[in-house]
Image (tube, rainbow, N blue to C red):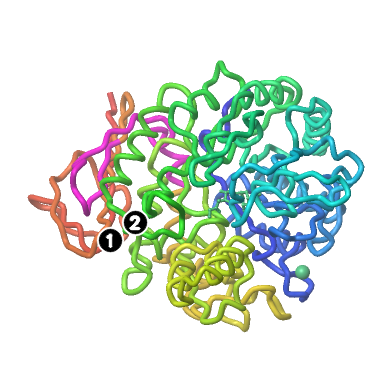
Amino acid sequence: MTEWWKQAVVYQIYPRSFMDANGDGIGDIQGIISKLDYLSELGVDILWLSPVYDSPNDDNGYDIRDYQKIMQEFGTMEDFDQLLVQIHERGMRLVMDLVVNHTSDEHQWFSEHPEYYIWGDQPNNWRSFFSGSAWEYDNSRQQYYLHLFSRKQPDLNWENETVRNEVYKMMRWWLDKGVDGFRMDVINMISKDQNFPDGAQGDGTPHFLNGPRVHEFLQEMNREVLADYDIVTVGEMPGATTEDAKLYTGKSRKELNMIFTFEHMNLDQGPTEKWDLQPLRLTDLKKNLEKWQLALYEDGWNSLYWNNHDQPRIVSRFGNDGQYRKESAKMLATCLHFLHGTPYIYQGEELGMTNVAFSSIDDYRDIETLNMYNEKRAQGVPHEQLMRAIYLKGRDNARTPMQWDETPNAGFTTGKPWISVNPNYRDIHAQQRHEQDSVFSYYRQLIALRKQLPVITEGKFELLHRDDEEIFAYVRNSADEMLTVYCNFSETPRELPVPEGRVLIGNYPAQKIQEMVLLRPYETVCFYEKDER
Ligand code: ISL
Ligand code: CA
């Protein structure tokens, strides 16, 4: 089987916020179908859909009630089948979200097969990712069940072989339908230390991240399911190191194709939690990405991302969403897309969409944000301080509706959207695709270049100017090609030596290069050379 996913670019759709076709304010499958031509125009190869399964939506579909039914608000299984055909007709592929660390408490399994879940007579001190204890008391059973996320997301007991076989059967059902792979939600949390020891300050993660049997389970899943299909797999893995990543993605290990690391996403937070804010130091980002680039070069594979439905918008985070919004959006895209690995684009990133700052907490919808706010308010933390953290880090930054045009509600819906649109939609929207110098057109070029120049997929990475706090510069080298990437992460103009080759792409009008390359605020410029021997 060819490793087609190595030359591919993935586009993530968060269906609830992508496009509403029937005016009820909620994105849906027909809405996605209506935008497939837009996605082909962008040039992406793989669409990853956040969950579209039947769910009571305590965590927007990451709490699944029925794995083989489509969420009513999103449409029907006929709509889904039509979507799959339409995607394939355009030469694209479809990756489904696989959420099997937990189900909804409304899944039939929870009432009919309690032994599929994790029970204890006494809770330990683990805290849930969504605030409060990770254990909930069940009156009828007179025991506590484990939920690493919301209390409506009980964790499945992967020690139980029947659970594993049920999951594998369900996966085969989707693959036999023709889907092209899975993004596996928190898949490195499925094996818990069976002694369930307390964690320091309630942090249970050392006892369930990359747990004792996780590799055994993934190898079994590979044998039982994945190996029979020509698909792509990516595991979402908070707390996975490069050493873990080699084990999860090394070829001979027969587990997954790639994983999502969180290390680069955690660099602008303090040691305790994501709400503990800290400015990014560019050298930390560079050194971290360098570590991943080098560790997975020979064996294993990187996924590359700045954004997803859980992260704030990158242009507001590592860029400048004011005066230099377009420049910094393009610069960040370049920096990421020319690394070694498979790039992921999150809906709206290709437009340079930004964070949002709603004035009232009532405008927020995310369970993580709301639980955190309520818990910390009760502890006496001031409202303003919490709102500041939410503006910078809250997950709803990524979940405001996709901005299609300048008509009311950004053309996302004719009704009342389930979450308000970002008020900047009149300036930032998808009609920019008709403009040559737009962020969209720039992403399209980056994606097209990946198909033309093998060095982008294959070249070896080397970091330049490693201690510079403003410039991210690197080279990609293969036997006969060389690509040099210069990125200015600051507003300060800088000069760098002229590399070999011709200018391949940049985000400012071409400069006349003499002694040095000038890097204006958030400028990126890349040089390419091919040895024609
Ligand atoms: O979002 C986070 C930090 O803000 C993480 O703690 C996040 O919850 C974690 O990365 C797991 O994410 C995945 O599983 C969750 C779901 O809420 C997320 O949307 C999903 O991406 C539970 O299924
Ligand atoms: Ca709808």
- Residue at horizontal 18 percent and vertical 42 percent from the top: 465
- What is the number of the mark on residue 522? 1
Q: Badge 2 local density, few (<14 within 10 Å), some, or many (20+)?
A: many
Q: Residue furthest bottom?
A: 408
User: As drawn, is 328 to the left or to the right of 89?
Assistant: left
Question: In the structure shown, which secondary structural element does the residue marked by tag 2 occupy?
Answer: helix
- Picture quarter containing residue 205? top right
Q: Residue furthest top?
A: 252
Distance (Cα) linking label 1 and label 2? 6 Å
Residue denoted by label 2: 331
- Picture quarter containing residue 163? top right
The reply to whether residue 98 is visible in this rendering is no
Q: Amino acid at mark 1?
A: Tyr
Q: Badge 1 local density, few (<14 within 10 Å), some, or many (20+)?
A: many
Question: In the structure shown, which secondary structural element does the residue marked by tag 1 occupy?
Answer: loop
Quadrant assignment for the C terminus: top left
Q: Is residue 274 magenta?
A: no
Q: Residue furthest left?
A: 515
Q: Amino acid at mark 2?
A: Met
- Picture quarter containing residue 275? bottom left
Tags 1 and 2 in contact by the CB under 8 Å rule? Answer: yes
The reply to whether residue 155 is visible in this rendering is yes
Stretch in magenta: 448-475
Quadrant assignment for the N terminus: top right
- Residue at horizontal 60 percent and vertical 72 percent from the top: 364
